[in-house]
Amino acid sequence: MKNNIKNTLRTGVAAVFGLVTMYACNDTWNEHYDSMSTSPTTYNGTTMQALEEEASDFAEIVKAVGFDSYLNSSSSFTVWAPANGSFNKDSVLAVLSVSKKDVLQQFVRNHVARYSIPLNLDEHQIHLLNQKLYSMTDKYQHKIGNLNILEDKSNIKCANGILHVIDGNLPFQNNIFELIESEYNKSTNPKKEEVSMYAYLKTADADSLDESRSVYRGYDEYGNKIWIDSVVFRNNTILRDLGALIYEEDSNYIAFIPSVEAYQARYDVAKEYLKYNPSMDKGLEYSRADSLQKSYANRFAMTDLFYSISMNEHIDDSLKSTQYTVGQWPEHLYYRKKPAKMPEDKKVNDIIAKVSSPTNPITCSNGLAYLFDEYPIDIYEQFLKKIKMNSRNLAGNFISSEDKIKGSNVQVTKNIGTPELWSGSWTTWIYDDQGAIIDSKIQDFSYIYIPASSTTNANVAFYIGNNFSGKYDIYVVTMPIWFYRQEIEVVDDKSVPKNKLAYNFRAWMWGKDENGNYPATGEQMKVGTQNTFTTPVPTDISVIRDTTFIGTYDFTYSYYGESEPGYLLQFATYVTVSTRSKYSYDMIYSGIILKPHNDDDDSGSSPIKAGPRDMFIEPMKCTGTLSNQYVKTLKQ
């Protein structure tokens, strides 16, 4: 028997879920409806029984997937049932013969929500059983999403919920994570279970039961709840580390999704740069070297593939991945247009344009996804970055004269005094011909100074860590000795270095062998046949840095992410009695740079340039007359 009843509910989006929970508990139906609601009817039976009468085609699908038992239970549900003839039942049944799970998740649960949700005065957002979000408009518009709720078949009050009949089926949209799974399932690649984005992500699933939204019926003999309908709280530790919660429906992302083949190709490239020293497996029952290689190769293949739309307020000009942080600027940032000040080592790379096509992007329930067969980001942008050691890094990795290399009895450091670490700013004031200040140039600096005897060559070494296996072009950044000694004079009304000693030095690289030991001697660095390096004679007090290329070194093993390095770089000044008027026995180190060698790039021997916020700033050439009394350095 059907009869009209009244409702006193007036609620908005924020309160609806708390209220419907209350309704499900006390079932005081006279409190559900407002006098201005559509004409509600009462059905003497369950939502499933009402469904069989009002929308038999949908009821047939519900029975076929075994969901009828839920709609006949005492739990409270709201069903938005497609009217007979409003969807292709035969097509759904055909899918059902292949995958009952897909029909249940993408069709049946896509039309059902927990608790009683009447069509009333306010628009509110609905969480369906498959966690998809839809908006149901007020009673005057009678809509859920873009579908109409039939006025004469809305607000049908049943013993365990409400039935609304609609004029079509609610479209199901994958969220981005579900799309990744779907593309994985479509792939016929024989190695996809071993290497693919989805296979790797699944290893980090840490889902848990959301008891507040799950339904149980009684307890088993051990006192455990018997769950008849469980809602899972999704959690993936890898995606959470990447800041990309692409499985949450209320998120909004742009995602770049590689094909299984593209992912495998990038993974294989990354592995080549992650060959760890087999000595780290000693005493272990598993290969730690192999585990690290696979884990990092997967991580690097996924680097910068996810972008939060809320983080990208300037999306037309640039893209910041979810891994972007201000402290790492400009890493994880991709320029779509050339900015006014282009950071060094960055370029315009419109990664969206590279993967856009008639089939891209794919609209998902929580953002946009671009499928691709070739990465729009090269390995140097994605993970194979420079290693930049500033003076503080060098001070922390300095080998004192008393220390021997671990794994060897060799001393590589000698004849040195106590290191001094300084940082500050160097200001040069510029005057016109009348003596008025017209400009100033300020350079930040930091250095480590390791003194030697005034007549003995300085010999020092620094550990190099966090490296990949493969070739690096190696540079040392120095500051002139006059800067430390503040030896400046005025010549022809210009301030110039009084101490014009340059540096003449040699360098060696030491690396652990497969047994974890350093050799008896290091490999001398060379550029061609040149094994001695000379810096320019200092003539300008505004030039306080010099970058010297000392050769390309092929690292056998990677120590990326390891606390204990496996390589060290040794420097020794090379000054003879006949050249001590030209070269300094001491050296001031501002940093060391290891730039991944690119065989397609012929700029390996060129000095490295630096951006405005990079660790190393290019020497600034001052113009005009420099007055010695206005040239000063601030040490702090």
Image (cartoon, rainbow, N blue to C red):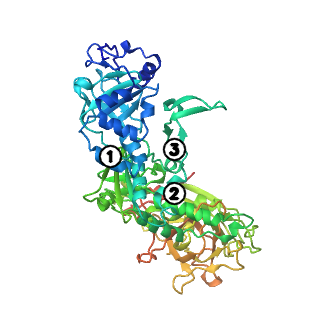
Q: Position of residue 508 (x, y in %)?
A: 62, 77
State the residue at coordinates (30%, 21%): 120
Please identify the quarter of the rendering in which residue 66 is found: top left
Q: Position of residue 170 (x, y in %)?
A: 30, 39
User: What x and y, as percent, mark residue 604?
Assistant: 45, 75
Q: Are marks 1 and 3 in contact (CB under 8 Å)?
A: no
CA–CA distance in space, label 1 to label 3 = 30 Å
- Is residue 435 at all visible to an observer of this figure? no
Query: Which residue does the image show at 75% across and 70% down from the upper left?
Result: 404
Neighbour tally class for label 3: few under 14, some 14-19, many 20 plus, Cα within 10 Å: some
Kindly identify the amino acid type of the residue bearing the numbered disc 3: Asn
Q: CA distance from mark 3 to mark 2?
A: 14 Å
Of the numbered discs 1 and 3, the one sitting upstream in the chain is: 1
Q: Name the mark on residue 571.
A: none
- Which type of secondary structure does the marked residue at label 3 adopt? loop
Q: Residue 200 shows which numbered tag?
A: 2
Q: Quadrant of residue 149?
A: top left
Q: From the viewer's perspective, is 205 left or right of 46?
A: right
Q: Is residue 296 above or below residue 23?
A: below
Q: Amino acid at mark 1?
A: Val
Q: Residue at x 30, y 37 (%)?
A: 57
Residue ID for mark 3: 235
Q: Name the residue that disc number 1 marks.
A: 92
Residue 325, given in percent of the width and then of the height, sits at 46, 49
- Crowding around mark 2 (Cα neighbors within 10 Å: few <14, some 14 to 19, many 20+) is some
Front position among marks 1 and 2: 1
Nearer to the camera, 385 or 28: 28
